[in-house]
Amino acid sequence: MRRLLRSRPLWIALVVIGVASVLPVWLSAYVLGVLTAGYYFGVFSMAWDLLFGFAGEVNFGPTFLIGLGAYTAAILNSRFGLAIPLCVIAGVTVALIGGLLLALPALRLRGPYFGLVTLVAVLLLQNAVVIFAGVTGGEIGMTVPDVLSLSAATNYWYGLIFLVICAIILFGLSRSSMGLILQASGQDPIEAQALGFNVTKHKLMAFSISAVFSGMAGAMLVFYMGAASVGTLIDISIGVQIIIAAVLGGRRSILGAALGAVFLIAAGEVLRPLGQLNTFVVSALALAVILFFPDGLLGHTLRRREAK
Amino acid sequence: MRSILDLTSSRANGVRMSGAVLLAMVACLCACSRSQGNEPIKIGVIGEESSVAGASLTKAALLAAEDINANGGVNGRRVQVITYDNHSSAAEGVRAFQRAVSEDKVVAVVGSYLSEVALAIEPWSARTRVPFITPGASSNDIPKRVHDDYEHNKYTFQGTTMSEHIAQSICDFSHDVLVKQFRLRKAVVMSEDAAWTTPLDARYLECLPKAGLEVLDHIRFNPDTTDFTPIFNQIERQHPDVIITGISHVGVQPTVQWHDQQVPIPLAGQSSQATNGTFWKDTNGAAEGVITRNTGAPGVALTPKTIAFVNAYIQRYGLPPAYCGYTSYDMVHVIAEAIKRAGSTDPDKLVDALEKTDYVGTSGREQFYGRDEPFTHALKYGPGLVTGVHLQWQNGKQVAIWPADKANAKVEFPAFVKFPKQASTK
Amino acid sequence: MVGLQILIDGFAISALYALGAVGFTLIFGVSGVLNLAHGGIMVVAALIGWFTAGELGAGTYGGSLLGILAGLVCAYATYLLVVRPIQRSRAIPHEESEIFVLTGTLLWGIMIQTALAYKFTDNPVTMRPLFSGVVNIAGVRTPRNEIMIAVVCWLVIGLLWLLVNRTRAGKTLLAASMNPRGLTLLGFELSRVHLLVWSIYGLLAGLAGVLLASFLGVGPNNTGQLTASAFSIVVVGGMGSVSGSLLAAYLVGYLETMTAYLVAPTLRPIPALLLLVLVVYVRPQGLLGRR
């Protein structure tokens, strides 16, 4: 039984990855670009899902961590001309530190207050970026001189490989013993503590992992786009899109979050001819999903499976 | 087991769905590729649809394409304008540019009135070797980069008056009207903190004293500011005779607050929103007396083409064009002319032809500075070329007040504006 | 002179903040909803007010009333189309409904903002002041409109206090915020209570939007900022506490005004944010909030 369960989805996943890797042969550079952006978004959503699904903490400001990683990398590259790998590492480090600074007090709070703190963090970062516009380019944004690659296909593969590696790590974590402890801590912290697990330590770990992946993906995204701005990396609406993607794909499934993200980005592009209204339609669709299909694509089936 | 099948079929459904989306996109692409023949010449136009100025950019470009096609097109081929919205974001501007180039295969791009967006697109114009003209972004850095790295950046052109020249025009106006006519002596510079105002302010500080106005203070405020009371207060405490502005991102709010608080100091300089035809309504008439420089003014025939364009625009869209509407219209024509002269849409040939532009458009006679001049590919400024006018809002209308040969009204200020004793009122 | 200027300016802007924040906190206290579409409702009221006053010729008074009405309608829409369906949905587990409501209202707010920008462009608009001209208060030139706004805000807040503390309907609201289950046991219809509180909220937010339009000017781009501002004040004051919101509104309003006048206008939002951080770390339930 177990073996069957593990091999079927695995094969499907392998097929999907295989098909995805050869898409550059047929698709135009622009479409590849859309998918690449979708893959980075997928990492954002998976990192969020780990925190939410397994630590039970709703993070309203995933873009705080993403923004820290992205802007650190962007500023270091454009002001000091450091090489891309160094900038990404620096971005990850700053995101991690920021995440810990946020998590330490925030984890003491329960319920809506935790979400509040994360929202406040995003507001702070947004204001900081706008106020120090001399360094960060303010609201309209800044550009970086280095990009990962000029070839759309190369960028696409970078994005795909990054997504696959992150997916493997995050999914693996979620199914590991640590993941189970996290799940227990998230759904019933008192019992978990009673069983002797250090709930806070595990939640902190989940937060750190989320921060590392968010920061890394943020930094990579900057070097993919060649630009950074509040509207594409920090704005609350981006955070909402990340959450929607995870909800759409199915909360607590990690892989569903990646699917949801790619789907959302693709939908946004398909609706582009609507011009200004495309944000409206995507938001309306997302609202409809929340109202009518809160379990998302994969979540629905996973729940049914668990019920049996 | 039923549950496993459910799981796999749902997973498969997810895969099928994304597969279907992808297939649809591929199908679209295959259907979209046509055979060679009388293919239209595609020009991409990137604007900011939710802002009055940015929306005017795309509308004027569409009008220009129609005019060109009505007159036989370019060497028999139609011109097709494809529009994009960058939502006032540099990153989206870049995305739009990439899409225009790689997906829609445009031969040139006309884009944006925001300097931050144009500066972000400039390196991509260089990387993709596609000519890019900005009809509204006035930062000095745009042509400066062309000069500093000509081989890479030569594909970028600036189709609007540079910040430095805008400031010079305002200084010239100040000298003729504010100092000589009204005998004002002291000024405060008030600008938003943005890419285009950095060179603007630098030139203000340099040329205003030469024009006869002592600069008492230089205030740069956050473009997100909504409450200007403390700023006006700070200015008033220094008792200047005039406030010289450099604002574009804001306009309605500071003007309305200036009026409501009856700040006794006149506003002049560059206020891009005040150049919009809808400004009077947006401010409920608080715009009375506001002076701003603009590419053109209603009823002022800068060239024989100006009035016809304005009327056609109003007839089509119901409101007058914003400042970058004039230049966007002109730049589409400039590109079409260049293609005609070059006899091809090859980027390097197009750049050569563009450099030789000598076109009388709606805003004046348009030529670009050359490789050897400090601001390569910027629009040339000077008498007989593109000079702009200064206008003032009076009784719901924009009237031209400078230069003297274009003026159609006298300068008048609202009653709450007070002048120092040595100034005369006429 | 600067001191008096700060005092007067700060008073007016704080009064406006207070009006918005009070509505926001009322909704949280009674309905348990953090309405992130708050800014959207205010901007709808402002834009409809401007549009009807100018384009449709209703004049300043007519436009203002229509604007407030628009705010009310928008609040109802928010409750009936977004909040209530989520709260009543069986597919969403009870512990998670708060999160879904937050996300839902956020999405709704984005929808409002984009729809408004599409119809009206993102240019800010202003409403003609009801009283134009300036008054000289001990050497400080103050627009009459500013004084009127402060007066109206306090009148409305006073009316609200009367409503909550002296009328039956108001006391039901108070009770609902403390113990909804107890209230149903006593035979009250909770759904009517919710409708009442959303009505009050709609009127408050609508009025705040219209007043803001005549004082400073408002555009669709301000939506997020307005929500964030109300939200920050409510957190500092204590979620669910009306007096807390009032206190916090004045605290934040004066801090901002003092910074803008004495330090630099660019740094205006900083003290409020720092205060927010301080409160969240040291006393997360807010100054006057209950744990």
Image (cartoon, coloured by chain):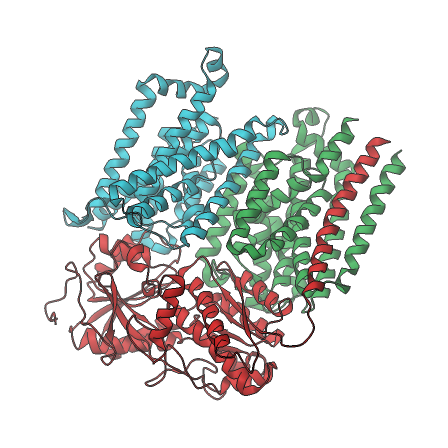
Rendered shade, chain B: red
Residue for point 62% across, 55% down = A269
Residue B113 visible (yes or no)? no
x, y percent for residue A85: 68, 63
x, y percent for residue B159: 44, 76
Q: Is residue B98 above or below residue C90?
A: below
- Say which quarter of the image contains residue C96: top right
In this view of the protein, which residue sits in the foreground, A93 or C15? C15
Residue for point 14% across, 62% down = B418
Residue for point 81% across, 55% down = A18
Q: Is residue A40 above or below residue B179?
A: above
Chain that is green in the image: A
Chain that is cyan in the image: C
In this view of the protein, which residue sits in the foreground, B248 or B335? B335
In this view of the protein, which residue sits in the foreground, B288 or A82? B288
- Say which quarter of the image contains residue A57: top right
- Say which quarter of the image contains residue A272: bottom right
Asked whether, in this view, residue B33 is left or right of residue C116, the answer is: right
Query: Where does the C terminus of chain A fall, quadrant-wise?
Result: top right
Residue C220 visible (yes or no)? yes
Residue at the top extreme of this rendering: C186
Asked whether, in this view, residue C277 is left or right of residue B2, the answer is: left
x, y percent for residue C235: 44, 35
Count how many numbered circles sit on residues in the image.
0
